[in-house]
Image (cartoon, helix red, strand yellow):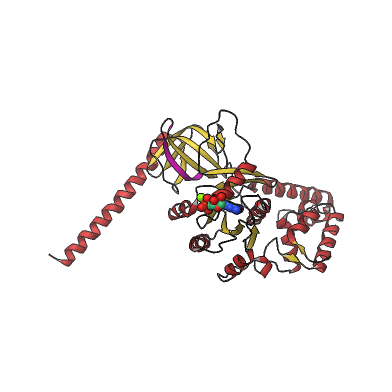
Amino acid sequence: MSKVRIYTLAKELGLENPKMLEILDGLGVSYKSVSSTIEEDTVELIRQIVDEENAAGGGTSAQSSAPITQSDEAAAAPSAPASQGTQSAAAGGQTATQTRQETAAASEVPHRAPVVTIMGHVDHGKTSLLDYIRKTRVAAKEAGGITQHVGAFEAQTSKGKIVFIDTPGHEAFTTIRARGANVADIAIIVIAADDSLMPQTREAIAHAQAAKVPMIIAINKMDLPQANPDKVKTDLTQLNLVPEEYGGDLIVVPVSAKTGEGVEDLLEYISLNAELEDLRADPKGKFAGVIIEGKVDKQAGVLATVMVQEGTLHVGDFLVVGENYGKIKAMTDSAGARIKEAGPSTPVQILGFSEVPTSGEKVSSAKNEHAAREVIAGRASDRRDAENAQVQRKLTLEEMMGP
Ligand code: GDP
Ligand code: MG
């Protein structure tokens, strides 16, 4: 046996990746990502640790450890009177443990699906790759469902849902970012294997770096005879982006949007990365979202695609975008099915705004129509104040300069 990838070992031992990294940290082993390889003797050591932990009580969580810990804690707790007998101390210990468990459960914010954006040079295969994923990973729509382009879709994988923003190119990313919103968790940079790095590839990389969004490189068109993935990797190294196999931490996945080769691996890497990022959002929290796309439909009227980031949207909710508000009359998911509510990392198309919102605008909710109007009135007055201040400044400057 030789070197083993961290996530492979984690899978084999039935551990979550973060837990595996915790063990490695504990051992002082350095790694770059879950796909880094570790030495044979470290692998042995980890196997032993996991075996011992399993033998010690079958759990990796602190709560399931021996009862001694509980009474120790009760004794150490300042509220436990010193005169208490062994029995009541044990009982006190139990209560403390229970409280701790309840607190942990209450504060546990659930995981959410990763939101992925695909960028790269024109003709390198962004649309083809998205089409392949959509064709193979999105459940077929019910007959009669209207196929609407909403700017995002949800792909089902063996590791759970992945949300793709399919408003192609950098525009989506940059207009959204220009408004101060960050909607993507991971950026896939598509590079054609027969063309290597091109101006828009460098631009895309720069955008992802500026937004501090983790990147995964997909070397596309691997089916072509002239495909040269090594050149792509060498060119990346010149940008200080060092692929894993060259000792760096950049994940590079060879794929073909034509044959589907490597797409499964790509999805797997996205899920692994999401797990590492530990993405969470509270479906019960205050709603927050971002406009992905807004448009006018001849029949339906104004349609807006909103990415739910926190909280849950319901039909009937009042939403505020900039200085406009709307009441959700109807909501559909990205596959076109009518839905009544939508939680974090869900792209939804909403009917109910009177003005077309712009991509990247932040969306919040209001208790009722009155509250929505108040928020808007506040924003309008802030804006007027800012405008007046600017006019004043200009006047003063003109006065100073004289006639
Ligand atoms: P985009 O501009 O990045 O969205 O690129 P497209 O998806 O429109 O692809 C540009 C061209 O490359 C089209 O003619 C595609 O058929 C072709 N193409 C995309 N992916 C592949 C691939 O994996 N293999 C081959 N042979 N052709 C591809
Ligand atoms: Mg395209």
Q: Is residue 285 visible?
A: no
* Residue 58 on image: x %, y %: 84, 52
| Dominant secondary structure of the residues highlighted in magenta in the image | strand
Question: How many circles with numbers are drawn on the protein?
Answer: 0
The residue drawn where x is 59% and y is 28% is 143
Which residue in the rendered view is the most extreme toward the front? 225
From what the image shows, is residue 147 above or below residue 384?
above
- Please tell me which residue lies in front, 71 or 159: 159
The residue drawn where x is 48% and y is 36% is 350
Quadrant holding the C terminus: bottom left
- Please tell me which residue lies in front, 144 or 40: 144
Quadrant holding the N terminus: bottom right
* Residue 153 on image: x %, y %: 56, 43
- Please tell me which residue lies in front, 145 or 180: 145
Which residue in the rendered view is the most extreme toward the top? 144
Q: Is residue 52 visible?
A: yes
The residue drawn where x is 80% and y is 55% is 12
Location of residue 394 (image quadrant)? bottom left
From what the image shows, is residue 380 above or below residue 237?
above
Is residue 366 found inside the magenta-colored segment of the image?
Answer: no
* Residue 214 on image: x %, y %: 58, 59
* Residue 218 on image: x %, y %: 61, 57
The residue drawn where x is 64% and y is 57% is 222
Left or right of residue 100: residue 126: left
Location of residue 325 (image quadrant)? top left
From what the image shows, is residue 42 above or below residue 272?
below
Which residue in the rendered view is the most extreme toward the left? 403
Per the rendered image, the range of residues in magenta is: 288-300
